[in-house]
Amino acid sequence: MLMNLRKYYRPRSLEAAVQLLSANPARCLVLAGGTYLVPSGRRDVEELVDISALKLKVMKQDAAVIRIGATVALETIIDNPRMRKFAGGIMRDACRANSASRMIRNQRTLGGEICSPLIFSDVAPVLSVLDSRVKFVNFSMEEKELPIAEFWVNLDRHRSKKEPQGYFSGLITEVSIPLLPKTSSAAFERIAQIPSQPSLLSAAAVIHWGEGGVCSEARVALGSYRGRADRLAAVEDALKGKALTRESIEAACGTNWTSLSPVSDNRASEAYRSAAAPSLVRRTLERCLKGK
Amino acid sequence: MELNFTLNGRRRSFDVAANTTLLSLLRNEAGCLSVKHGCETGECGACCILLDGKVVNSCILLAAQVDEREVFTLEGFPGWVDYLKRLNVGTDEPAKVSAGPSAFQNPEAFATDQNPAEYDRLHPIQQAFVDTHAIQCGFCTPGMVLSVLALFIGRGLIDWPALNPKRKFRMAMVPPKKKPFPPPTLDEIRDALAGNLCRCTGYVKPIEAAVEAAKRFVESK
Ligand code: FES
Ligand code: FES
């Protein structure tokens, strides 16, 4: 329970929401689904700005991008027929892996998941390999858009400095995901004790196929490893320009991992993550190969 | 702060503190005791309710978040609506009947001017839980029943009604007129119930109950 919560607002316009947030930045937070915030019991929260009335629940597709509003629930993404097909359904699989409970997925929003204080999320590596971008407005009402990795760097910088919001000074409005060319395949894999448990480790990959089945671009990311999403540049470079086979995948996964030392936590030890990650990445890439 | 929302087809107003959760409002002010107080962290699903036709955990929702929205609990099934009306739950007026341990043990509370046949009948989903022995202590059952109800609404087996309370009253009993979609698969049922923890049954029976209820809905066509 949020013991010190005194005020709750549900503004109808973005301007009003930003005004409320900037008036008391140290004590006033954004409330999206509330699945992390409400049970967190945070005592520093005195005011909440519920953004559910801001018309950010829209999902649409233009010529080259899928746009997902910040307050679109994870279950809405799962149920969306377009997302079911897009990129081999990896976005849908990641949203489902996020929580086994449909109740939570009905409440939890994509914007909230991106800003969540928990750095381990199955959605993060998928958004990373899909080259997503995050649109947000800052406290001066300037609209900005950043690649998701850069957005997270900003978010963590603000958080570590204990700047206003505890998160960052702004409000996410939209996540955009570029459409993939037809000559590409994508996969998402995870390891968990049982399917309904949170992931110990997750991996996502997108492969673009060039002439003669050669990999023209590879994007590979790990989740729940060191942070939200660790792009594996060495693996990506090792795959680029190669004809993808089980052997070339095996060789790419055998590249030097020592610079990436994972965290230890109550879900899995550092040793476990180090041992499991190369196999998981190999499995993910082999799934891409099957989906070619 | 003042709050107005539709609870089980009836417009209700409450005065709540900003940090009141929907769970405590429903149990302590609105008399909806089918909504169980379990973990309070969104893990167990005992506090499950339907918000605008979708299942959510009421323990991690602030009451303020449902302002001007539609909440449905097990009490919204036929019989309970009228029973609660007669108890005057949530108002200052004296109760017209006494609250028994269970409405079903208090049959005179069900003698109404509306169709009495509706009141001695459980909802088909509830009946399927009884028939398949899917209830042991029963603590998780209201949440499970609502999860199955939401699944059926999502599959078009049951109509989620417009705001009209008369329609809503019938909503829970009557499959929609249009041709129903095929019944949910076992995987879909498992997924729908995955958020409801049960410490007694081992899940096999509740899943059987959902399969049985879906079968009855489809056959009733
Ligand atoms: S009491 Fe709400 S999920 Fe357990
Ligand atoms: S029947 Fe006892 S918790 Fe499910």
Image: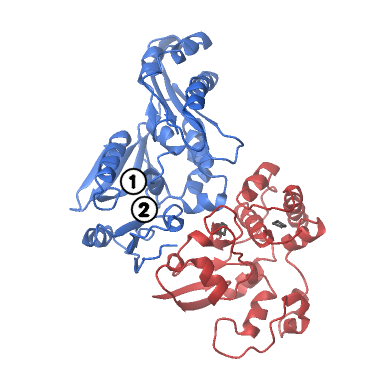
Chain colours: A blue, B red
Q: Which residue is mark 1?
A: A174
Relative vertical location of residue B32 with respect to residue B53 in this rendering, above or below: below
Q: Residue at x 48, y 44 (%)?
A: A77
In the foreground, A110 or B161: A110
**Type of residue at label 2?**
Leu
Asked if residue B10 shows in the view, the reply is no
B208 left or right of A170 in image: right
Residue B197 locus on image (x, y percent): 64, 52
Residue A13 locus on image (x, y percent): 29, 61
How far is the residue under mark 1 from the one under mark 2?
7 Å
Residue A169 locus on image (x, y percent): 24, 50
Q: Disc 1 sits on a residue from what chain?
A: A
Query: Does the residue tagged 2 have its C-beta within 8 Å of any atom of ligand 1?
Result: no
Q: Residue at x 78, y 55 (%)?
A: B219
Q: Which residue is mark 2?
A: A56
Counting residues from the start of the chain, the first of labels 1 and 2 encountered is: 2
Residue B65 locus on image (x, y percent): 43, 64
* Helix, strand or loop at mark 2: loop
> Which of the numbered marks, if any, corresponds to residue A54?
none
Query: Does the residue tagged 1 have its C-beta within 8 Å of any atom of ligand 1?
Result: no
**Type of residue at label 1?**
Glu
B140 left or right of A19 in image: right
A69 left or right of B198 in image: left
Q: Residue at x 67, y 42 (%)?
A: B187
* Helix, strand or loop at mark 1: strand
Asked if the residues shown at circle 1 and circle 2 are in contact, with their CB atoms under 8 angstroms apart, the answer is yes
Identify the image quadrant of the N terminus of chain A.
bottom left
